[in-house]
Image (cartoon, helix red, strand yellow):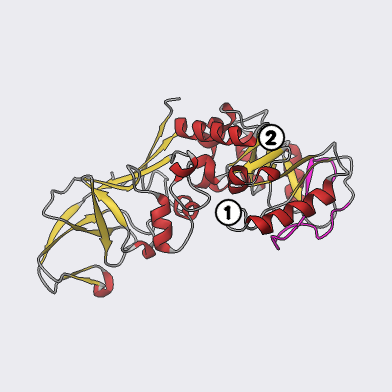
Amino acid sequence: MRSKISIDLGALRRNAARLLEELQGAELWAVVKADGYGHGARDAARAALEAGAAALCVVTVPEGVALREVFRDARILVMGPTDEHEQATACEARLELVMGAGRIPENVPVHLKLDTGMGRFGYAELPEPTENVVGLMTHLATADTDTVFAGRQLELFREATDRYPRLIRHAANSAAALRIPEARFEAARCGVALYGLSPFGTDPKENRLEPVLGWRSRLAQVKELYPGESTGYGRRYAAERHTWIGLVPVGYADGFRRDLTGTEVLVAGERCRAVGTVSMDSFAVELPRELSAGEPVTIIGDGVLAEEHARHAGTINYEITSRIESGPARAEREVVDAG
């Protein structure tokens, strides 16, 4: 085994219940794009629906079609831009589409997206909804960092949509669902928190969330370095004293990024620092003493958070998880479904 990805669907269900508790009657729409942020879209979707989610959200029509093959009756919303060919496919698969520009297509349920400050996809002014428009939405730019700006976006959205009481409105993401009650409307699109990842980059426990994904490997080899000897490309790490290092058979092709040099993982239950240049298929850790090949390594889990790796790499936690390569050619994948 090079590495093992474990997915705890019980934790995902509990996170969904936590979000529903915060939403106080608004629907939870589970965002399962990008293969469920690296957790597996089908498994995540099934657990979320079982926990009370009312819809699934993806970005592409092929993502939606793949889910429709499994979930015959689920509400599935495609949030990304589509062309006419994709719109025809979406109609055939009974998907719902988001439109933020151009003509509103017919014969398919549509959600109109208003750009209230995100500055990405969305109409500058809300067009008059046609009969097949079923929802209105916007996307918050700063729900995790600047609630004042988010509040202005919500005011603009409310002003533009209050005259359409028959249409379902949705604006909140995970951060807004947890911290901005006025963002709830009739539904909230939650992704990152569903997977037990903090939308604020902090410890998920602060918001009573449980990480769903674990990533573990082992020491494939242990080497002894004498002062001046190095490991890895470019000799970025050279031993200053007699040092033991362990080689972990996981690298940037598996999702352990090159900029994670210096982050910490667990080796045999102890925190150890990743050192040297991360290779395509391996990285090195500095060991506290001589250990044996085969000792367990925890990359994410057992108290090691994706948020820690994200801070070290200068990115966000869901970029860390969504880049993990969990296909059978690179890793073993285990789904734990303990309820």
Query: Which element carries disc 1, helix, strand or loop?
Result: loop
Residue type (three-letter) at the residue carrying disc 1 = Asp
Please, which residue is most extreme toward the top here? 339
Q: Percent from the top left, x then y, of residue 240?
A: 14, 71
Taking 262 as reference, is 269 above or below it?
above
Q: Nearer the viewer, residue 61 or 317?
A: 317
Q: Is residue 23 left or right of residue 10?
A: right
Q: Determine the residue positioned at 77% across, 52% down.
A: 155
Q: Residues within 10 Å of mark 2 (few under 14, many from 20)?
A: some
Q: Determine the residue positioned at 51% across, 52% down.
A: 200
Q: Percent from the top left, x then y, of residue 130?
A: 89, 44
Q: Percent from the top left, x then y, of residue 124?
A: 81, 60
Q: Is residue 57 left or right of residue 285?
A: right
Q: How many marks?
A: 2
Q: Determine the residue positioned at 83% across, 57% down.
A: 102
Q: Determine the residue positioned at 79% across, 44% down.
A: 110
Quadrant in the picture for the N terminus: top left
Query: Which element carries disc 2, helix, strand or loop?
Result: loop
For disc 2, the marked residue is 26
Q: Earlier in the sequence, mark 1 or mark 2?
A: 2
Hey, which quadrant is residue 145 in on the image? bottom right
Highlighted magenta segment, given as a residue range: 106-127
Taking 64 as reference, is 258 above or below it?
below
In the rendered structure, find residue 144 and report the number of the disc placed on it: 1
Quadrant in the picture for the C terminus: top left
Q: Main secondary structure of the magenta part?
A: loop
In magenta segment, residue 130: no
Would residue 283 be visible to someone looking at this image?
yes
Q: Nearer the viewer, residue 218 or 8?
A: 8
Q: Tell me the CA gap for discs 1 and 2.
A: 20 Å
In magenta segment, residue 108: yes
